[in-house]
Image: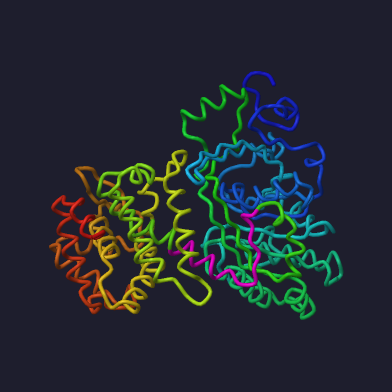
Amino acid sequence: MNSMEKLSIKTLNNLKHTEGFSVPSTETINLPEKVLQFGTGVLLRGLPDYFIDAANKQGKFNGRVVVVKSTASGDLEAFKQQGGLYTHCIRGLENNNKIEKNIINASISRALSAADEWEDILACAADPNMQIVVSNTTEVGIQLVKDDKIDAAPPASFPGKLLAFLHARYKAFNGNPAKGLVIIPTELIVNNGEKLASIVMELAKLNGVDQAFLDWLSAANHFCSSLVDRIVPGKLAPAESAAFIERYQYTDDLLITSESYSLWAIEASPEIAKTLSFAGADKGVVIAEDITKFRELKLRLLNGSHTFTCGLAHLAGYETVKQAMDSREIEGFISELMFREIAPSIVGHDLSYEEAKEFGEKVLDRFRNPFIEHRWLSITVQYSSKMRMRNLPLLLKHYERTGAVPKAMALGFAAYILFMRCSEKNGVFTGNANGKSYTIQDDHAGWFAEREQLDGKELVKAVLSNAAYWGHDLTQLPGFLNAVTDKFEKLVNGEVSKAIQESCS
């Protein structure tokens, strides 16, 4: 390969014998298109497309992905220049062993713009090889836009685009029930498959389609709820990127990096699972008729512990998760939180403490990953809604189970309140910690800014008693108001270590 040449199909041969690389064969690059994917982001390329590429290389799926860019931002030039190829650098820890892999992913056949190439996208509906639709359009993408017209070019919303595609397929195959598709949304919404199906069906009725199509839409197509779990920050850090280019002598505008851990849990029947043959290529794909257990583990132990800890770690002066995990105090706090408060609160008839503990140990490994720069400030985005959706159920369950104050959760709440204490100027909400200001990105920040003049005790009480937001008056939980107030005052006074030690005793 010539020095600093860009990754493309013609340059692959020069990489085939490079140590530490997984490179696709010519046969893999020429496989038929079986998947339509709404979304070009790093999560889709780092998880579903990763599994499909692995399966293709093992001869287990034998199909490629047509990627659709639904939004106006960004362009597809890099996809076109590189023939859909991109480098996936996997960096992580497993059982304290470092994992470093480089994969040239060839799962993407082409990338199309919904705004400029809608007819080409609809033409894919007539391809008999097409089997699956995957999406990640963010949580905002799965919403009903009642006046969306499916005969627009293109429809405005993602459900509108999906409905138009399914309608085109229905017409192309004269309503053949065998030509329905398996649709797998990956947006972070509980029961995302069911929600998407209901929106598509309602939108179809609003568009006045005939009953025969509605029947085909309902009976021949399968909307599967799914859960994705992998940290995919995107590009390598600048220093590592420069070292990578120097070593391998090529550039890649689509290069992504991810942790080694991966999970794609898909809710599907054994019959539907036959279509999802890529699942056999990697243990990270789990197909089950009920994925509640996997959702609960991720939402509470991974996301929940992140949310309880992010404000505290930031106030303690740590910028990244890895930096905080190098501190015995923060690592001890997270372990206490996960294994003594969260895990016992999620145990049920189909989830044992041992399963929760095993998952929690993997989470700790992921938090320690030296290759991933996961910033605490990024985790605080929409802090309030995350506390309400992820952690409030845990707090209530803990009280239901024990009737006692959960010390670590109380400290997490106190840190949340102090982090959110802010002022507003020109629509920007700003907090201050350790002599440095930070921007708060939270839909509830205005509420805090309106109470900027409250003293600490008043603010804590105002937050916890806000039943309109939490759905509960949290001051009524025995001892919780006093515990949070005590931790809040210690944090304000700079006694972070003391507050953590008391929460772990």
- Quadrant that contains the C terminus: bottom left
Magenta stretch containing residue 201, yes or no?
no
Q: Is residue 143 above or below residue 44?
A: below
Q: Is residue 497 above or below residue 454?
A: above
**Residue 134 or 349: which is nearer the viewer?**
349
Determine whether, in the image, residue 8 is placed left or right of residue 227. right
Determine whether, in the image, residue 33 is placed left or right of residue 347. right
The x and y percentages for residue 487 are 19, 61
Magenta stretch containing residue 289, yes or no?
yes
Residue 19 in which image quadrant: top right
Q: Residue furthest top?
A: 3
Determine whether, in the image, residue 3 is placed left or right of residue 481. right
Q: Residue at x 71, y 35 (%)?
A: 23
Q: Is residue 329 above or below residue 373?
A: below
Q: What is the tally of numbered marks visible in this picture?
A: 0
Span shown in magenta? 283-300
Q: Residue at x 50, y 49 (%)?
A: 231
The x and y percentages for residue 305 are 38, 59
Colour mode?
A: rainbow
The x and y percentages for residue 201 are 66, 75
**Residue 451 or 157: which is nearer the viewer?**
451
The x and y percentages for residue 150 are 69, 66
Determine whether, in the image, residue 161 is placed left or right of residue 344. right
- Quadrant that contains the N terminus: top right
**Residue 52 or 116: which is nearer the viewer?**
52
